[in-house]
Image (cartoon, coloured by chain):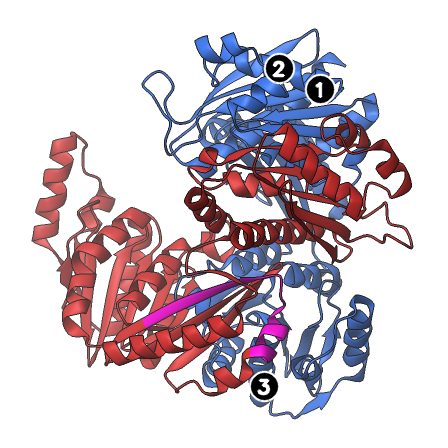
Chain colours: A red, B blue
């Protein structure tokens, strides 16, 4: 079954509000095996709604409309649906009774706009709204279906969850299965080249999408069909093949993240960790503590933005800073030693580099960043050569630091 | 001028990624006086892209396409545009030279997919991408315009800001003047109530938009017309009136930020600052160092996630931790004192609180966060009562800490 989503609202068109209704609908519908073909946002102009409804219904089997916010907006949507279907409006007594009761309970007087809420296009099948006054509406049009819901997110979600999803599940036989593979510290193109032969071997119903972010790429596999078991087997088979090929850069699957993986591995191994950050300036720490429960293994960080802090708190030797500089392998190693000692942790990771836009030199251009992870016995270091953008350099260095921290623990404990 | 936006990406259709590109485009385009009529998301199927392009171009004057992420996806978009226009692809030498140079500098070998990036539909006008390899493209088609850009947000934004917006401004005769007033630590409704009489007095061509974020609200004034000078006067007049009314919560204007304001004030006063963070876990530090040049006044941070670090490095008294707890006014004051002493700075700010989702108690529920800013003589403290969401609590506390740091310096130096 192919679906389209229409969201109505000027506030979305002008970017004042991000369309999270469509994202939520896209997710829940694709999980129930429906293929979303198109999402459109239009203003609450009558003719725009009629036009987009005709277009999307022509391309799909079912259209979901979330109708802007508030009674006025809903009226325009209802009128547009009625005109598209070529039917009249009628006064829906049951809705009127429901709204009247609701208002009596709350002691609020009814207004004209609430009265108008009870006008419905002929042929409507009412979808109960347990969270508000405006009900959802379902219409059959030839062999297609139109579902219209209010734009208030919790009302829309209630109607979907309580009324629409049960109805859809009963209808469809198809399944869609997703699997996301998470990688870091390798570019999209490099990954594509590495796995091109495996991807070429995919059956037609299996697709791959590359979702890159700074220093990270997510690979999303999607398969659809009516044979749930064999689709699952195919996804599992190719996930295993890709995982083997990309084993050096994969850190997790699906909704995980580097910091969540660090959570799991630290809890599993019973380790205390700490950080010492120069150029990343607290970014590594803030990523680690973004995970609930991180206080169980994360002790703290010394953000040593100045050489004095490197010397005084992290005990980096003056001679190292003087002869090799703050941005050097020896400094980053001594920063890890300092963090291990000062914070009294098992494993630490440190960063020092030239984030830019100033401070570069011919030997150490902007983007030169040293990273070290280690314990008192073993250290691994990496010289990252990033670009010229300060913000990106900090983010990339943060991803590398988290990757190295996880890798170090994985390989040494 | 009427515009449409097309975003291409399965990840948006299935709700894995929220379409922030369209929101950003909607905002910046409507600010330049363009009317957004439709936003559509489709998958990267060739025929879907061609169809939606034809539909939207029929309804508008200019279409903006953000083309999925990465080289593979871009290829499909380019091919669809070429087929829609009825033109062939050609190898664009200048793009090839640019990419080659970029890769030589980074010492990365080029692959086939980078080669394919240089294929362009005939009739293309290249829009320079200062942030990546895939350039933006502009096509004239009859009396309409198609603009296609990569889907990576910072690349798309760079192309829009550096290439498209100047081109659009030159096209239209109208002047649009914007002024953004930045506030923190007050809600949208409170601000609306405070300034409702001033806003009621606005002339018709002056509009206000409330752009709320966590613990921050931006007020954007927009005025448009062909009388540049009188429009500017009106904007200045109402900016002054609003600034006077909201003086206690305004921290800056336009593209500024709390951390940029801290930069200015620290440089101006010649101060060294530091931070001591418990619940914010490095967020305050990372916001401060996001500003280029922050190493001139920012010395560092002690992220004291554990009580040991609070005791050992920040010298918070054991008796304080024992009797008043880590989340207390006395602890946050001693953290500031510890930061002042250990980091050897003039002014410090500290945070300690229950970020959640665990760790709350009847006396100190989740969201209880103490913040202190001060020097050796004076301290200001604030008890923030935030909500139940860990991520939001950290962000709100960070905004409060930066606001208090700025306020303290402004009032005491």
Q: Chain of mark 1?
A: B
Disc 2 target residue: B315
Does B168 appear above or below B299? below
**In this picture, which residue range is highlighted in magenta?**
A177-194
Q: Which residue: 57% across, 20% down?
A: B310
Relative image position of residue B408 (x, y in whole percent): 67, 17
Of tags 3 and 2, the one toward the viewer is 2
Which labelled disc corresponds to residue B240?
none
- Reading the image, the residue beneath label 1 is B342
Residue identified by numbered label 3? B79
- Asked if the stretch drawn in magenta spans residue A59, the answer is no
Chain letter for mark 3, please: B
Q: Are marks 2 and 1 on the same chain?
A: yes
The vertical placement of B14 against A333, above or below, is below
Q: CA distance from mark 1 to mark 3?
A: 60 Å
Q: State which tag comes first along the sequence, 2 or 1.
A: 2
Q: Is residue A190 magenta?
A: yes
Circles 2 and 1, Cβ within 8 Å, touching? The answer is yes
Residue A281 visible from this viewpoint: no
* Residue at screen point 90% across, 41% down: A323
> Measured along the vertical axis of the image, is residue A139 above or below residue B368?
below
Dot 1 surroundings within 10 Å: few (below 14), some, or many (20 or more)? some
Where's residue B315, x and y in %?
Answer: 62, 15
Is B398 displayed left or right of A135 in the figure?
Answer: right
Label 1 element class: helix
For residue A67, what is the image quadrant? bottom left
């Amino acid at each position: 079954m192919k679906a389209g989503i229409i969201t109505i609202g000027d506030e979305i068109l002008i970017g004042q509000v991000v369309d999270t209704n469509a994202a939520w609908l896209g997710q829940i519908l694709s999980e129930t095996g429906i293929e979303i073909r198109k999402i459109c946002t239009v203003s609450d102009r009558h003719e725009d709604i009629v036009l987009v409804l005709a277009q999307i219904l022509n391309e799909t089997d079912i259209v979901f409309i979330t109708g802007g916010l508030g009674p006025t907006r809903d009226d325009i949507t209802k009128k547009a649906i009625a005109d598209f279907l070529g039917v009249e409006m009628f006064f829906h007594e049951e809705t009127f009774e429901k709204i009247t009761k609701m208002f009596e309970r709350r002691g609020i007087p009814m207004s004209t706009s609430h009265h108008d809420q009870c006008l419905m296009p002929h042929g409507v099948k009412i979808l109960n709204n347990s969270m508000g006054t405006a009900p959802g509406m379902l219409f059959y049009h030839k062999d297609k279906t139109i579902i219209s819901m209010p734009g208030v997110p919790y009302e829309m979600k209630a109607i979907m969850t309580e009324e629409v999803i049960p109805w859809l599940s009963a209808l469809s036989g198809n399944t869609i299965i997703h699997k996301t593979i998470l990688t870091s510290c390798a570019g999209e193109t490099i990954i594509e080249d590495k796995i091109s032969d495996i991807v070429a071997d995919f059956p037609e119903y299996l697709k791959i999408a590359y979702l890159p972010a700074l220093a990270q790429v997510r690979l999303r596999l999607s398969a659809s069909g009516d044979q749930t078991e064999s689709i699952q087997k195919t996804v599992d088979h190719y996930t295993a093949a890709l995982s083997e090929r990309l084993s050096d850069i994969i850190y997790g699957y699906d909704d995980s993240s580097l910091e969540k993986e660090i959570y799991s591995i630290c809890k599993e191994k019973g380790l205390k960790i700490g950080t010492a950050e120069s150029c990343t300036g607290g970014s590594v720490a803030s990523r680690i503590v973004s995970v609930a429960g991180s206080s169980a293994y994360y002790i703290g960080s010394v953000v040593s933005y100045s050489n004095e802090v490197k010397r005084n708190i992290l005990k980096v030797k003056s001679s190292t800073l003087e002869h090799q500089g703050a941005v050097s392998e020896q400094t980053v190693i001594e920063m890890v030693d300092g963090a291990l000692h000062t914070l009294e942790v098992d494993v630490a990771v440190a960063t020092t580099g030239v984030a830019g836009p100033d401070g570069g030199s011919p030997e150490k251009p902007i983007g030169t960043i040293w990273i070290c992870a280690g314990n008192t016995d073993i250290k691994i270091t990496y010289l990252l050569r990033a670009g010229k953008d300060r913000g990106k350099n900090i983010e990339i260095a943060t991803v590398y630091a988290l990757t190295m921290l996880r890798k170090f623990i994985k390989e040494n404990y």
